[in-house]
Amino acid sequence: MPFAVYVLGMAIFSMGTTEMMLSGLLPLLSQDLAVSIPAVGLLVSGFALGMMFGGPVLTVLSLRIAPKRALLGLLALFVAGQTLGAIAPGYAVLMVSRVVAAMAMGAFFGVAASVVVGLAGVEKRARALSVLVGGLTIATVIGVPAATVVGERFGWRTSFWMVSVFAALSWIAVAVWVPSRSTSGAVGVIDGLRVFRRGRLWLTLTSNALALAAFLGIFSYISPIFTEVTGFSPAAIPVLQFLYGLGCIAGIALGGRIADRRPDVSLYAMMAASIVVLTGFALVIHNQIATVVVFLAFGFVAFATNPPMTARAMALAGDSPLGASANTSAFNAGIALGPWLGGLAIGGGYGFVAPAWIGVALAIASLAVAVVAGRSVRVEEKTVVLEGKAR
C-alpha cells in the first residue's frame, strides 16, 4: 500500500476526531458558552448536516481542480474552520465553524477516496478505502478520548487547537507525500453528476444509510443501556468502549482484505453477521458476560461491513470523488436516522432495549436493499453482453 494512502488516513484521523469529540466536551461547552446541553448537542447535528449537504456541494466545485490541489485546499479550509471554533466568542460562531469544518471534511473524504483508489489500484480498492475509514476508527479509539482528557484539563478550546495543529501537520504531509499525478486528473462536473443516473447507485447508498442507522441507533444510547438494563456501573463504560474499539480495529483490517477478494460475498456475509450480532445483543442484554462478548463482536461487524459497502458505492460511481462524497452523505443520513428512531422508541415508553430491535429491523432492510442492488447490477451486465452479441 503506497505511503500516501496512510498520509490521507492521518488527515481523516484529525477530521474524525473533531467530528466526534464533542460527546466528551458537552458539559464544558455548556458551562463556558452559557447554553443548555441540548443546544450544545445541536453542534453535533450541525456537523452532520454540513457533511451531508455541504460536502457534495464542495465536491462538485472541486471536480475541475487537480486532485492534490483540491485535497490541500479542502484541508486548509478544515484548518480554518477548526481554528475559528477554537477562538469562537460565542455559540453562533462556533456553529458556523462546525459547519465549515464539516463541509470540508465531507468533500475531502470524497476526493481522498478517489485518490487512494488511483494510488493503490482497483484490485486493492477496499483495502485502500479501509485505511481512510481506519482513520475514523483510530479517532474513535484514541483521538476522542485524548481530546476529552485535554479538554477537561486545559479547557475545550485547547482540544480544538490540538486538532487544528494535527490537521496542519497533515496538510504538510499531503503536500510532501501525495503525488501530483495520483489520479487521471480533474473530472468534469457533468461527468461527475452523470453517475447519479444509475438507480443501482441510489439503492446502494440507501442500503449503506440503513446499515449505519442500525448500528448508531444502538450505539448512541449505549451508556444508559449498559447502566439501566445490563447493570454495569458508569465506571465500566470506558472499558467497554475500549473493547468496542478493539473490535472496530480488527473489523476494519479484515473487512478491507476480504472485500477485495469477494466483494459481493463479503458484503452480504458481513450484513448477515450484523443481523445475527444485533439480534444477539438484544437477547443477551441482561447478562453482563454475554453482553461484553457480543459488544466486542458489535464493533467488529460494524466496521468490517464498512469497506465492502464503500467499495461497492465507489465501483458503481466509477471511483469518482462525487460518488465517494455522496456515500459519506448517506452514512451521515444513517447516523442521523438511527438515533432519531431509537429516541422515538425510548420516548414512547418502550425502554432502552427497543433501539436494539430497531437496529435488527434496519439491518434486515439494509441487506434486502443491498441484494436488490446487486441483482440489478448483474441484470445490467447480462443485458450489455447480450446486446454486444446481437451486434
Image (tube, rainbow, N blue to C red):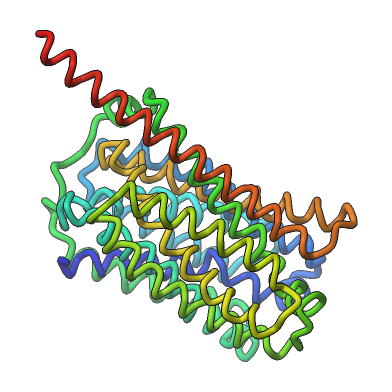
Task: Pick whichever, 26 or 217, lies toward us.
Answer: 217
Q: Is residue 52 left or right of residue 72?
A: right
Q: Is residue 226 above or below residue 350?
A: below
Task: Pick whichever, 317 or 76, lies toward us.
Answer: 317
Task: Give residue 158's position: percent from left, percent from top.
Answer: 55, 81
Task: Pick whichever, 345 or 167, lies toward us.
Answer: 345
Task: Give residue 311's position: percent from left, percent from top.
Answer: 32, 49
Name the quarter where the C terminus is drawn.
top left
Q: Is residue 64 above or below residue 113?
A: above
Q: Is residue 376 above or below residue 102?
A: above
Say which residue appears at 72% left-offset and 58% top-offset: 355
Q: Is residue 311 left or right of residue 154?
A: left
Name the quarter where the N terminus is drawn.
bottom left
Asked if residue 351 can be seen in this view, the reply is yes
Say which residue appears at 26% left-offset and 52% top-offset: 262
Say which residue appears at 70% left-offset and 56% top-offset: 357
Q: Is residue 55 left or right of residue 284?
A: left
Q: Is residue 169 left or right of residue 280?
A: left
